[in-house]
Amino acid sequence: MSEREWEFAERVGRVEPSATVAVGNKASKLKEQGVDVVDLSVGEPDFPTPARIRETGRQAIADGHTTYTSSNGIPKLREAVSKCLKGKGVPCGPENVVVTPGAKQALFETMQALVDEGDEVVLLDPAWVSYEAIAKIAGADLTRVDLGQHGFALEPALDDLAAAVSDETTMLVVNSPSNPTGAVFSADAMKGVRDLAVEHDVTVVADEIYDRITYDAEALSLASFDGMAERTVTINGFSKAYSMTGWRLGYLAAPEPLIEQVSKVHSHSVTCAANFVQHAGVEALQSVETEVAEMVAAFEQRREIVVDLLADQGKMIPKPEGAFYAMIPTDEGPTDDMEWCDRAIEDAHVAAVPGSAFNAPGYARISYAASEERLKDGFARLANEDLI
Ligand code: PMP
Ligand code: GLU
């Protein structure tokens, strides 16, 4: 085929491919070549989707739930989502919910509906890699507030946030529990966000996808705070708590005027989330409490192992209070986190994501959604290569 000179849209030139997905792909490629890789890269639970959810999905296909659904999602699922949000103190009805193929799509549609070229979006660093990309595709200018110097907590960084947010700010993204740090923001931190958002009339995107995976802390819903329901877009999904990454199911909840606009993007892009997957989602929200508790208990045990293994190497990290990630300072071996991760995968055969992907150079993120045995093996390999 002859080479053609493509002229790409300027918006795709603003972003790089997802670093989390890229490292995961690199690890998969090595595994295909027969290399024994300890893959601590992509944040994906290592448990199967709970059996009841799988069975409901299978039955839904057998029952012929294979057509399009109403664009914003089947009523049963939107009702179950709104009930779940009401349980967290968020005023919400089925009319406030759009069911999406994954939380990523919910974030994408939200930004498309709210962010114009040159609008300011504020991120709290370290920030999950796709916030920056999704915001930039929408045309955003980013303002970043660093939580790294405050042990990844938001409360001590509220003054910095106050300095960053102004009447010019369009949107602030808050992710608690946080990917990549595992921090869970306190009630006072959330109140601080509320005060600033109300004062400057800012829309807040609250990504709560890890809210069921917490250890010694409670994940709070921003939309439950006074004055926040009318300005918050709550994002959530089924990938993490229910180990349903490949099903692609998530949602956003927001006031109706925004739902009306988001629905346009939704209906013209994905039409709807897969029908039988939505049925499985109802089952997830209603009947797998025990299975979720078991997975969370396993993650908690692994968190202890990771914190202890790092302490054995003289590295004290703030204990993650939620999600299943830890940030390892890359101050041993090559101090450049990209180089550190290259050496980790090439020499130690351990896959981790460079902190730079989260605007946090000097760290590598590991996902501890891996078995205790693999975690211990991975850390021994890193120590062998003098990386920790
Ligand atoms: N938000 C955060 C913070 C995440 O870590 C992820 C992980 N993929 C997502 C959103 C998107 O999840 P999904 O599209 O699988 O629902
Ligand atoms: N959110 C997970 C991660 O950060 C999955 C990959 C992705 O979507 O970024 O690793």
Image: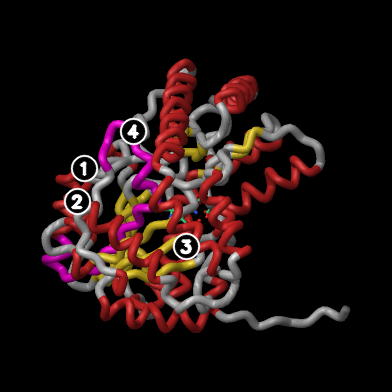
Q: Which residue is mark 2?
A: 190
Q: Within the image, what quadrant is residue 326 found in?
A: top left
- For label 3, the SS is helix
For disc 1, the neighbor class at 10 Å (few under 14, some 14 to 19, many from 20) is some
Residue 333 shows in this picture? yes
Residue 57 pos. (x, y %): 56, 57
Q: Which residue is mark 4?
A: 215
For disc 3, the neighbor class at 10 Å (few under 14, some 14 to 19, many from 20) is many
* Above-or-below relation of 181 to 93: above
Distance from disc 1 to disc 2, alpha carbons, whole Å, reads 6 Å
For disc 2, the neighbor class at 10 Å (few under 14, some 14 to 19, many from 20) is many
Distance from disc 3 to disc 2, alpha carbons, whole Å, reads 23 Å
- What residue sits 44% from the left and 51% below the top? 284
- For label 1, the SS is loop
Name the amino acid, label 3: Lys
Magenta range is 196-218
- What residue sits 62% from the left and 53% below the top? 22
Q: Which residue is mark 1?
A: 186
Distance from disc 4 to disc 1, alpha carbons, whole Å, reads 14 Å
Please state if 86 lies on the left or on the right of 117 as rendered.
Answer: left
Q: Which residue is mark 3?
A: 104
